[in-house]
Image (cartoon, helix red, strand yellow):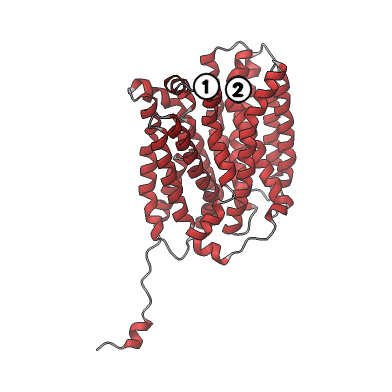
């Protein structure tokens, strides 16, 4: 007969923690789903508008709705992650994105916008919680992994924009099938992420229970500087995505070539997006980096005011691409290195991305409004120059070697 005391002394079996490479694969696949469902819409807007009889204003909301969802849900994501565990919450985010893609592709106006809102909600959760996950799982390699996932995110955004029309026309899927295609990517991401639900011991949930965030994060000057850096770079990025082709057309560039030049900006952003977090992790502070990034953005916008010089125009686009690629990845890196624990990283991520995407949603509307008032791109470009200056000032605060 077995001894009850000995039986009680036996340690309970614990589920194995998934292999780190599987975690990295899961993170990278999640980043595949964080931009492609949004950037795949732009090239298809004309077909969607014609098929469903949408106005230009309603068509524009297809881009604005996800950004508003980001702004509204980002502050809530850390609390949800703390209660359910980050791994489960990220899975819930992926399932929400999948549901949104299915609804959006069903071919009705109501489901088009409801599905778009669901996609925004799911991506908001992933946006906020990934920096904390990286900080917990790979504290010594946070800069490198941030480089990998931000670069992957930017690359997938560019690919999704490029293949939307070939999927619609070349593969005869129509706009509905082209949008639904990205559900395949989400299903793959879910499949790879499922093993994370069995992880214990070093899970984010257990870590956040042991670490309480400092009270008054919204009253922290450093937290606001990180938040403003995130918001101002988002403002500049989405204004560029929305209006750069129209600005280039004012310089006499064709509609087709202006689209290719926008792709050039996105392509140039990729190496900058990868290198910025790696460099940031090697410096005591990142103030010099933020000054260089802000100056690149300022000079890029200022150069667009000059007409008739194609060489100068290309230089300006290169500067804009470098600034935008480096700024988004550095903003996400700040969330990791300006906090002391995983819970704080999630809270700062929610705060910075809430304000950031609210500014991003407001930016293209503001620039369009100013253009309608002035009938010229000069004042809108001056506005972007001013925002680039503000980015430098926010970066000088966010780049200090301190924690919130």
**Callout 1 crowding tier (Cα within 10 Å): few <14, some 14–19, many ≥20:** few
Q: Of residues 133 and 139, which is closer to you in this image?
A: 133
Task: Give the image location of residue 231, x and y in percent.
Answer: 65, 39
- Residue appearing at x 51%, y 15% in the figure: 256
Camera-near label (1 vs 2) is 1
Mark 1 lies on residue: 55
Q: Is residue 385 above or below residue 92?
A: above
Q: Earlier in the sequence, mark 1 or mark 2?
A: 1
Task: Give the image location of residue 115, x and y in percent.
Answer: 45, 37
- Residue appearing at x 71%, y 44% in the figure: 287
Q: Is residue 3 above or below residue 140?
A: below
Whether residue 17 is visible here, answered yes or no, is yes
Mark 2 lies on residue: 244
Snapshot quadrant of residue 297? top right
Q: Is residue 108 left or right of residue 387?
A: left
Q: Is residue 404 left or right of residue 43?
A: right
- Find numbered disc 2 in the image and state the secondary structure of the residue it sits on: helix
- Residue appearing at x 53%, y 51% in the figure: 129
Q: Of residues 288 and 13, which is closer to you in this image?
A: 13
Number of callouts in the render?
2
- Residue with the most extreme front position: 110
Task: Give the image location of residue 327, x and y in percent.
Answer: 62, 38
Q: Of residues 147 and 127, which is closer to you in this image?
A: 127
Snapshot quadrant of residue 233? top right
Mark 1–mark 2 Cα distance, whole angstroms, equals: 22 Å
- Residue appearing at x 59%, y 45% in the figure: 332
Q: Is residue 275 above or below residue 17?
A: above
**Callout 2 crowding tier (Cα within 10 Å): few <14, some 14–19, many ≥20:** some
Whether residue 323 is visible here, answered yes or no, is no
């Amino acid at each position: 007969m077995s001894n009850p005391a000995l039986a009680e002394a036996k340690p309970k079996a614990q589920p194995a923690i998934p292999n780190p490479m599987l975690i990295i694969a899961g993170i990278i696949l999640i980043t595949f789903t964080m931009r492609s469902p949004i950037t795949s819409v732009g090239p298809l807007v004309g077909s969607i508008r014609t098929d469903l009889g949408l106005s230009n204003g309603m068509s524009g909301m297809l881009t604005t709705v996800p950004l508003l969802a980001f702004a509204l849900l980002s502050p809530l994501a850390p609390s949800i992650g703390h209660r359910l565990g980050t791994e489960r919450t990220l899975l819930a985010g992926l399932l929400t994105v999948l549901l949104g893609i299915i609804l959006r592709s069903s071919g009705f106006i109501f489901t088009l916008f409801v599905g778009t809102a669901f996609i925004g909600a799911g991506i908001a959760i992933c946006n906020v919680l990934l920096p904390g996950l990286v900080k917990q799982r790979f504290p010594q390699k946070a800069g490198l992994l941030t480089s990998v996932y931000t670069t992957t995110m930017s690359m997938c955004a560019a690919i999704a924009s490029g293949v939307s029309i070939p999927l619609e026309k070349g593969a005869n899927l129509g706009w509905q099938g082209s949008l639904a295609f990205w559900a395949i990517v989400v299903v793959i991401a879910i499949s790879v992420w499922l093993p994370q639900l069995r992880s214990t011991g070093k899970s984010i949930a257990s870590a956040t229970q042991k670490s309480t965030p400092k009270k008054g994060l919204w009253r922290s000057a450093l937290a606001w500087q990180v938040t403003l850096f995130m918001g101002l770079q988002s403002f500049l990025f989405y204004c560029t995505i929305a209006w750069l082709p129209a600005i280039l057309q004012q310089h006499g560039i064709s509609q087709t070539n202006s689209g290719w030049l926008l792709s050039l900006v996105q392509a140039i952003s990729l190496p900058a997006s990868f290198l910025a977090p790696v460099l940031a992790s090697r410096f005591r502070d990142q103030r010099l980096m933020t000054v260089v990034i802000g100056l690149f953005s300022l000079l890029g916008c200022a150069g667009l005011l000059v007409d008739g010089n194609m060489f100068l125009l290309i230089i300006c686009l290169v500067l804009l691409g470098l600034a935008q690629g480096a700024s988004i990845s550095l903003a996400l890196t700040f969330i990791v290195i300006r906090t002391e624990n995983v819970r704080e990283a999630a809270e700062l991520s929610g705060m910075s991305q809430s304000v950031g995407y609210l500014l991003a949603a407001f930016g293209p509307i503001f620039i369009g409004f100013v253009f309608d008032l002035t009938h010229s791109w000069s004042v809108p470009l001056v506005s972007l120059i001013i925002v680039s200056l503000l980015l430098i000032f926010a970066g000088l605060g966010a780049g200090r070697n301190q924690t919130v």
